[in-house]
Amino acid sequence: MLETSKCGLPAHTLIDNHSPQAKQLRHYFNQILKDWFDNDVPFRQLNLITGNVTSTNIIQNGLPEPTTLNSQQLKQNIIPYFNTQTKHVYIIENANVFIELMFRLPQAALICGNGNNRNPSIIELLQLLEKNGVALHYLGDLDTIGIKIAANTFVKLQQTSIDCFLQLQNINRVNRWVINGVHRDSKRTKHIQLAEPALQLQIDRIHSSGIYVEQEELLNDYCQLIEQQLATTT
């Protein structure tokens, strides 16, 4: 924003999604970054706004949980700040469920996906964790979008197996949760093709049933599963 201000433009010009002039200018600069710099130019202000990731029991900084990191912090060496007691991290798609789990399970290490698999900061943190031997487990909505988010997240991981990733949200539990589900919506259960067979099975099951299940409905099950896993690994 400082750069645009120096040019005599409004500070928010490059992140303005409303005015036609701002959209054109933003498109112009994006093309320059892509064609001439291979997208390798850091915009500190934009990164600070859009690159946040919120977690619990992962970073030791003496502050109350949760902890929010931005993309600039993740570019530094944050490994010395990792909680060495953390062996399992649970990626929670829904922000409301993340907050509820944080209060119910204050000992659990959680990352808030917030329905967003395109946030590079989340992926950077996940990759750092898996390289340090932390097991990553995913929990999300049981609908087409939720499974697609899981697929888009998993494909970016480098050392996590699909069995570990879906250890809690495995096909047997998905079958049970869907059987007990009550919500039907053809749009939320539409069929799509995914590269990962284990996630394709979940899509097929949700589509064939026509039933979707939101994370809020599974909160008690989540608490029980996470508590059991942590009890057997500590």
Image: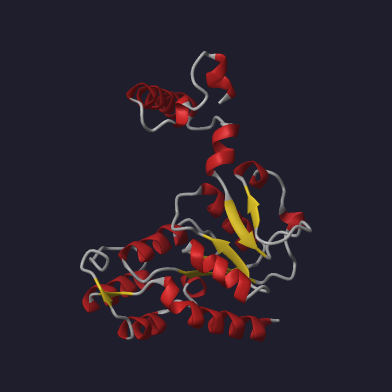
Q: Quadrant of residue 6?
A: top right
Instruction: Say which of 105 and 33 sits in front.
Output: 105
x and y, in percent, of residue 212 in the image: 31, 73
Instruction: Say which of 97 and 124 sits in front.
Output: 97
Which quadrant is the N terminus positioned in?
A: top right
x and y, in percent, of residue 102 in the image: 61, 69
Which quadrant is the C terminus positioned in?
A: bottom right
Instruction: Say which of 211 and 10 sits in front.
Output: 10
Relative placement, left or right, of 200 versus 155 is left
Q: Judge whether 65 appears above or below 183 on screen.
A: above
x and y, in percent, of residue 15 in the image: 46, 32
| Residue beneath the point at 27% across and 63% down | 193
Relative placement, left or right, of 10 versus 78 is left
Q: Judge whether 177 appears above or below 49 on screen.
A: below
Q: Judge whether 200 appears above or below 67 on screen.
A: below
| Residue beneath the point at 61% across and 63% down | 130
x and y, in percent, of residue 11 in the image: 52, 24
Q: Can residue 132 be seen in this view?
A: yes
| Residue beneath the point at 71% across and 51% down | 78
Q: Can residue 160 be seen in this view?
A: no
**Residue, far top:** 8
Relative placement, left or right, of 76 versus 11 is right
Give the image's coloring scheme.
secondary structure
Instruction: Say which of 32 and 95 sits in front.
Output: 95
Q: How many marks?
A: 0
Q: Judge whether 17 appears above or below 191 on screen.
A: above
